[in-house]
Image (cartoon, rainbow, N blue to C red):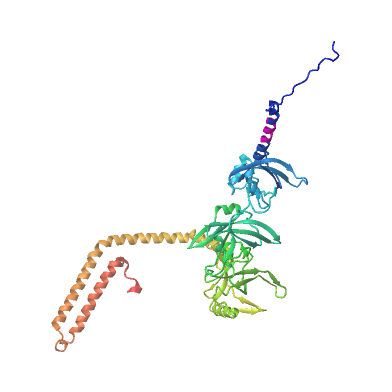
Amino acid sequence: MSERGPERARAIVRRSRRAGFIWAVPIAAIAVALWLAVRALAQGGVKVEVMFDSAHGLEPGSSRVVYRGVKIGEVDSVAVTPDGRGAAVTLRLDRAVNKYLRTGTRFWLVGAELSVTDLSSMRTLLSGPELQMEPGPGERATVFQGLDRPPPVPGHTAGTAFVLTADRRGALREGSPVFYEGEAVGVIEAARLVGPRRFEFDAFVRAPFDKLVRTDARFWDASALLVSLRGGALKAELVSPEALVAGAVAFDTPADAGAAPSAANGQTFALYPDQGAAESAAVGPTLSYVVRFSGPVGDLSDGAPVRLRGFLVGRVAGRSLTWDARTGVLDAPVRIELDPERLHLGGSDARAAVDAMLSRLVAQGLRARLDQSPPLVGGRVIDLDFVPGAGVGRLIRFDGETEIPSAPSGDLQGVMTKLDAVPIQEIGRDLRAIVARTRVLVASPELKDSLDHIDSATAELDRALREAGPQIGPLTAKMRETADRMDALTEGAQLLVGGNGESQNRDLPSTLHALTQAARSVRALADYLQRHPEALIKGKPEETR
C-alpha cells in the first residue's frame, strides 16, 4: 500500500458568457411594477380639495367635475371639516387640467338650489348635483373655497361694474338681469344690506353695452308690472317675464345727455323704485314749495310726479300732519320740489325767475290739484293747471316758505267728495212724499169723473168731425176759387184804370183795395178751416177771432 493517501476530487469551474435565466423573472416583475406605477400616476390625475358650506348630496365616484361641458374629473371623497363648520370635498382631476389649478380658479355647485331661471339646476334633479370649474390667475394651489351657486358673471367677461343704492331690496337678488331698452345687457352680482333702509347692489354691464351707462344714467327696479295711460289707452308693460321671478333692473339716459361721458368702473347710482320715479328725478338743483289740499293726501307717495299742463316739472318731496292747538286746525301740507331746468329757467337766479312765473300764472287761475294717472288704477300725482272760475290768486309767502294755492281734486275721489255733499237722504225723502201724494190724487173719485167727461166729449167731437169731414174739402176748395176770381177781377180793374188816376173816378181805387182785402180774408178763412175743421161745430175761439 502506498504511503500517500487517496486522491481528492477537484471541481472544475467554468465561467459562462451568458447570465442565467433565473434572474429574468424578478427583473420582469420589477419592470411591470414600475410600469404600472407610472401608468397609475399618469392616469390617476391630481387631487385637490374644495371647501363648501354643505356638500348638497355630492357622491364619491358618481358626482362629476365639468369644465366647458367636458368631464375633467370626479368627486373622490366627501368629509366634514375638522372644525365641523363645512364639508371638505376631494376631487380627482385629469392631469391635463393641472396647469389651470391657480389661486384664482373657482369651483361651484350646480343643482345645489333649485332655480326656475337656471335650467341646469332643474336637470340635476335627476342626475344629482355636479361641480363646475372656471380657471383663473394666480399661484399654484390645491385647496380652494367653493361657491354654492354659479357666479353671475364668468371671470373672462369684459364689461364694467357699478354700484346701485336703494332704500329697499324688492325682488332683486344675485343673478337678476339688467336691461337696456328690453335687451339683457348685464346682471346683478351681489345684493347686501349695508345699513338701516339702505341696500347696495353690484351691477355688471357687459361690453360694449357698458358704454351706454353715462354719468347721468338712471337705474330703476323693473320687477313690477308698469301700468300707464298712453295714446288714450290703458297699457301694461313688463320688461321680461323673467323679471316676475328673479327681479330685474333697467336703465336709461336722458334724451339730451348725448354729451355726458361714460360712467367709470365702480361709480355709484341711485336705484329708483320704478320707471316713473326715475323719469321724474330732478335734472339739477330744485326749488321747494308747499301746497295745502282740502282733501286727504295720505295716499300721495313721496316721489310722485308734479306736472304743469301735462309736462313733468318736479316731484313730491314729502308730506306731514300738523295740529295747531291755538287755532284748532288739522293741517296736512305737501312739500313739492320744482326743477328749474325742466322749466327752462335754470341759472344763478332761478328762484326769482320761477317765483315770477308762478305769480303771474296763479293770478290767471293756475292751481294745484290732486289727480290720478292712469285714472282709477294709477298713483296719485299733482297737476298744476288752470281751473275755470278760480279767480285771481297769489303766491303765499310765510315763515320762509312759498305756498301755491290749490283747488278741489278733479279725479274720482274729488267727484265722490262732491257727491258726499249732495243731500241724497233729503232728496229721497221728498221724492217719497211726492209719490205718495200722486197716488192719493190718482185714486180720488173727482179725477176719475173728470177723465170720464173728457173721454165722452172727445168721442162726440170725433163723431162730428167725421160727419162734417166730406163737406170740408169742397167748401175750402170753393172758397179758394172765389178768392182767386176776386184777385183776377181786381187785376182787370187795375188795367182798365191804368196809371192815370186823376182822370178816373176817385172812388174806384178804394173799391179795388176793399176787393183785394176781401179775397185775402176768404183765402185765410179757407186755410183756417182746412187746419181746424172742428170750427164749423164749435166756432172759432174768442182769443183768435
Q: Nearer the viewer, residue 437 or 463?
A: 437
Residue 443, percent from left and from top: 49, 58
Does the segment drawn in magenta span residue 34? Answer: yes
Does the segment drawn in magenta span residue 255? Answer: no
Q: Quadrant of residue 307?
A: bottom right
Q: Of all residues shown, which one is farthest toward the top?
A: 1
Q: Nearer the viewer, residue 349 or 479?
A: 349
Residue drawn at 32 percent across, 67 percent down: 538
Q: Specify the principal SS of the magenta part.
A: helix
Q: Nearer the viewer, residue 377 or 486?
A: 377
* 145 lies left or right of 389: right
Q: Is residue 424 visible?
A: no
The magenta segment is 28-36
Q: Quadrant of the N terminus?
A: top right
Residue 224, percent from left and from top: 58, 57
Residue 81, percent from left and from top: 75, 45
Residue 128, percent from left and from top: 64, 41
Q: Of all residues shown, which one is farthest toward the front?
A: 2
Q: Nearer the viewer, residue 397 or 152?
A: 152
Q: Of all residues shown, which one is farthest toward the right?
A: 3
Q: Of all residues shown, which one is farthest toward the bottom?
A: 502
- Check the image and report above or below for 94 versus 284: above
Q: Quadrant of the C terminus?
A: bottom left
Q: Quadrant of residue 507?
A: bottom left
